[in-house]
Image: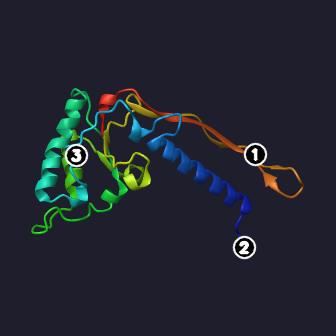
Amino acid sequence: VNNYSLIAGKERSRKKSFDLGLQKVAFLGNKVVKGLLNQTDIAIDTTTIPKSLKEMNFNEINVFVANVLEKYRKNCNRTAYPNVFLIPESDYNGLSAQVSPQFPLKNKFQMLQEAFDLIARKHVAILPCVDADQDYNKLGLTRYALYNKDMDSIKLVKAIDYTPTMFNNIDGWNLVNTAFARVGGVFVNRPQEILY
């Protein structure tokens, strides 16, 4: 308490609020722009993931691993490999379970990571996203997104980054300032390099 700065605390709070708002726009868009998870020109595959990854047994997860990258490659006419697999956080949190309880050598996350990295010949980030979970979005569904994170393929338009102005004293006691930013939605230049 002795070293707490009210001004710094308010600035951290405002920046955190901005970051969370930016995250919502980046994944779900808003009334004006689209986010990563609700683009309209993206192919949707509803057969490869019939249920959450954490609930899949050994055989089901093997079928998923065998098919998902091939479906991605077909979707993009074999021009790119993915480098991000975005999954609902509720599913991600369950991937520490063993693939096979009889032979507990690898958990599901390790198996997925090794399979993606081996086939793509590069690291594929498997990332959790709370906005991909139907309990936390307005899509009405759980969404998985496999995509090539590359500036030529997909980007979040940020014309002006978060910028706080200088603090000013307007009443001889309180310091006030304003912060501003300009953010657009997610622009997808190569929709074939994303697969829902």
Q: Residue at x 33, y 61 (%)?
A: 93
Which image quadrant: the N terminus?
bottom right
Q: Is residue 117 left or right of residue 183?
A: left
Q: Residue at x 45, y 39 (%)?
A: 35
Dot 3: within a 10 Å radius of its alpha carbon, few (fewer than 14), some, or many (20 or more) residues?
Answer: many
Quarter of the view holding residue 72? top left
Q: Is residue 187 left or right of residue 113?
A: right
Question: Residue 58 placed where, x, y %?
Answer: 13, 58
Q: Residue at x 13, y 64 (%)?
A: 100
Q: Residue at x 35, y 27 (%)?
A: 190
Q: Is residue 135 visible?
A: yes
State the residue lying farthest toward the right. Answer: 172
Dot 2: within a 10 Å radius of its alpha carbon, few (fewer than 14), some, or many (20 or more) residues?
Answer: few
Q: Amino acid at mark 2?
A: Asn
Q: Amino acid at mark 1?
A: Met
Residue on which disc 1 sits: 166
